[in-house]
Amino acid sequence: MKSIGLAWLVVLVTLLASPLLAQVDLTGIWSPVFDEDQPERIPGPELVDYLGLPINDAARQWALSWDPDRLTAQEHQCQVHTAAYIYRGPLLLRIWEERDPQTQELVAIRNYISNYEQNRTIWMDGRPHPPDYAAHTWMGFSTGHWDGNILTVTTTHIKQGWHRRNGLPSSDEITLTEHFIRHGDHLTHVTVVSDPIYLSEPLVKSQDFVLDVDEPTGGGIGGGWLYPCEYVDENPGRPKTEVQSYMPGENPFVHEFADRHHLPVDAALGGAQTMYPEYLEKLRGLAKK
């Protein structure tokens, strides 16, 4: 009898520890909280502010040659933020599940992102990622699994986009790993981006959301589900072949952010070392000179 009771205990403990039972329901309407990185996420980052980002020389050179007037070009006016960046904006997020109608097994978790009206599918049925040569999209190809009560998502096949929307590029070879963590009516979203072209180390960011009980319908941040972006001619008469850019050494904004915040330019130019607390000691040393 003792052996039977022990066997049932093992089964019970196994079931209680099962990731299936640990899954949480992420469905609902979620609005962003901007307590973290608000200046970057709402008004936008300052020019030549790459501080705290593990960029390499290639990314830095791209960013320094980027002219903000490029955003007035029609092909850039409505350019979608990729899955690795879009959750940091003034979006409204709807999450729902897609289940097999016969077995009720979870097939996918769907996201609708009001910013740029993006639909995203996170496949939960174990399907593999497509080959490298498959088409890349703004949202990429995503697969997910449960780590206890945390939804972990891996996304590949993402188009070229931004690590920071002041000219710092992300390549079309990035891999995005996400963790969706729900605490009651609070959702934490953690992203880890690996970029073999423009980053020397993974880039980790996080953002938070709160559950909306009522369906938002009005204006303001989070109000309304549509993003009516239209292309217009903001610079009449400008040749269509012109590419807004700076030649090496000609960017006029190199000192602007650094001088405003009393930082050395080397700090503003970023790099992996600027992510870590030890860099403060180096800054103090530079300040004494």
Image (tube, rainbow, N blue to C red):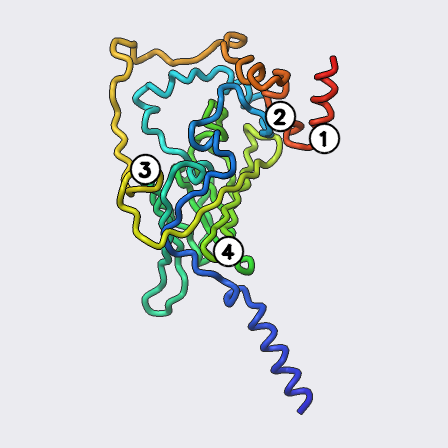
Say if residue 133 shows up in the picture: no
Q: Which mark is residue 220?
A: 3
Q: Is residue 9 left or right of residue 29?
A: right
Mark 1 lies on a secondary structure that is loop
Q: Which residue is mark 2?
A: 271
Which quarter of the rendering shows the N terminus?
Answer: bottom right
Q: Which is closer to the viewer, label 3 or label 2?
A: 3
Picture coordinates of residue 216, whole percent (x, y): 30, 47
Q: Residues within 10 Å of mark 4 (few under 14, many from 20)?
A: few
Mark 3 lies on a secondary structure that is loop
The amino acid type, in three-letter code, at marker 3 is Gly
- Between the C-alphas of marks 4 and 1, the distance is 33 Å
The amino acid type, in three-letter code, at marker 4 is His
Q: Which residue is mark 1?
A: 278
- Between the C-alphas of marks 2 and 1, the distance is 13 Å
Q: Residue at x 34, y 45 (%)?
A: 119
Q: Which mark is residue 183?
A: 4
Between disc 4 and disc 1, whose residue precedes? 4
